[in-house]
Image: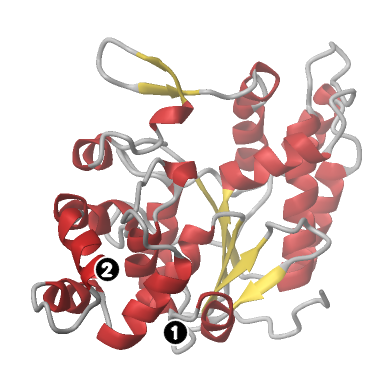
Amino acid sequence: MPADTSSSAEKLLLLDSASLYFRGFYGVPASVTAPDGTPVNAVRGFLDIIAKLVTMYRPASVAACWDDAWRPRWRVELIASYKAHRVAQTLADGTSIEEVPEELTVQVPLIREALEVLGMPPVGAADHEADDVIGTLAAHATGPVDVVTGDRDLFQVVDDDRRVRVVYTARGMSHLEVVTDDVVRAKYGVRAAQYVDFAVLRGDPSDGLPGVAGVGEKTAANLLAAHGDLAGIRAAARDDRQLTPRVRAKILEASDYLDVAPAVVRVSDHADVAVPAPAVPDAAAATALARRWGLGGAMDRVLEALAAAAG
């Protein structure tokens, strides 16, 4: 994809950090290690991703959005199966530990340190996921916003009128897809504003969301086209003349799930976060960190990209 020449003094780049450092981890060979043998493939991969994104989209500010809680209790209280299949361990206080390769786990503190010296400290909120941080920052931004993620759940924040779009990484960093409302409509047959209700109906096994049994993407899109939103669909289900008996029965049987699922799927727009200031890297600290951990030219590329975007 060509570089974005529409640089704005207010453009905000929101990074779904875990999505991107996982991509770095699996995209850079495990043989990439620090002088002491510690794996740094995720760190180097993540830094190169940031350098590429800053070069392409030339933001005024970058927020590395962070999962302070990858499985918030308030979501689990509503739907117990939420991300349950990813839990490696549950601590005595109820905190869930996510199943993550040990070779990646040891790199996360270094990723945070690298972001700190680059002047873009991780942005998180207590008992909220990175998605909620993104949702809040996007909702309150005054300029254009690019959200970088491999998670289609964030299609719900797309808003053409407010110039909020998603840079979708599912096909890799060489095949980035800029998602606007037209793209969401072309992919799924729904508007971005309907995406939460669409995702609730369809469900998502990767997040432990069952959806409505027997209602797939096509049926969900058709129902939303006919009835507007989930409330309209549920009202139609109470009127036995508006839906087929099969679909009506499925919607009614899923009532308990439909009561709570929208609150789980919808990203927050009121997490306790502030819009980040433009990054001011500590170049000396960044260079020292890169030398210590054998980060190659990845750190230099980020520093150069940030300097160019600021200029």
At which x and y percent is residue 24? 75, 41
Display coloring: secondary structure
Q: Is residue 286 visible?
A: no
Task: Give the Cα separation between the discs numbered 2 and 1.
Answer: 35 Å
Residue visible at 67% across and 25% down in the picture: 104
Label 2 or label 1, whichever lies nearer to me, is: 2
Residue visible at 38% across and 57% down in the picture: 274
Name the quadrant of the C terminus.
Answer: bottom right
Say which quarter of the image contains residue 269.
bottom left
- Callout 2: few (<14), some (14-19), or many (20+) C-alpha neighbours within 10 Å? some
Label 2 sits on what residue type?
A: Val
Single out the residue that lies furthest toward the front: 245
Along the polypeptide, which appears first: circle 2 or circle 1? Answer: 1
Say which quarter of the image contains residue 8.
bottom right
Name the quadrant of the N terminus.
Answer: bottom right
Residue of label 2: 247
At which x and y percent is residue 218? 46, 72
At which x and y percent is residue 225? 36, 85
Label 1 sits on what residue type?
A: Arg
Residue visible at 25% across and 84% down in the picture: 227
What is the secondary structure assignment of the residue under circle 2?
helix
Q: Is residue 301 above or below residue 160?
A: above
What is the secondary structure assignment of the residue under circle 1?
loop
Single out the residue that lies furthest toward the left: 238
The numbered dot on residue 290 is: none
The numbered dot on residue 162 is: 1
Q: Is residue 51 visible?
A: yes
Say which quarter of the image contains residue 106.
top right
Q: Is residue 80 above or below residue 283?
A: above
- Callout 1: few (<14), some (14-19), or many (20+) C-alpha neighbours within 10 Å? some
Side (left or right) of 198 relative to 98: left
Side (left or right) of 94 relative to 175: left
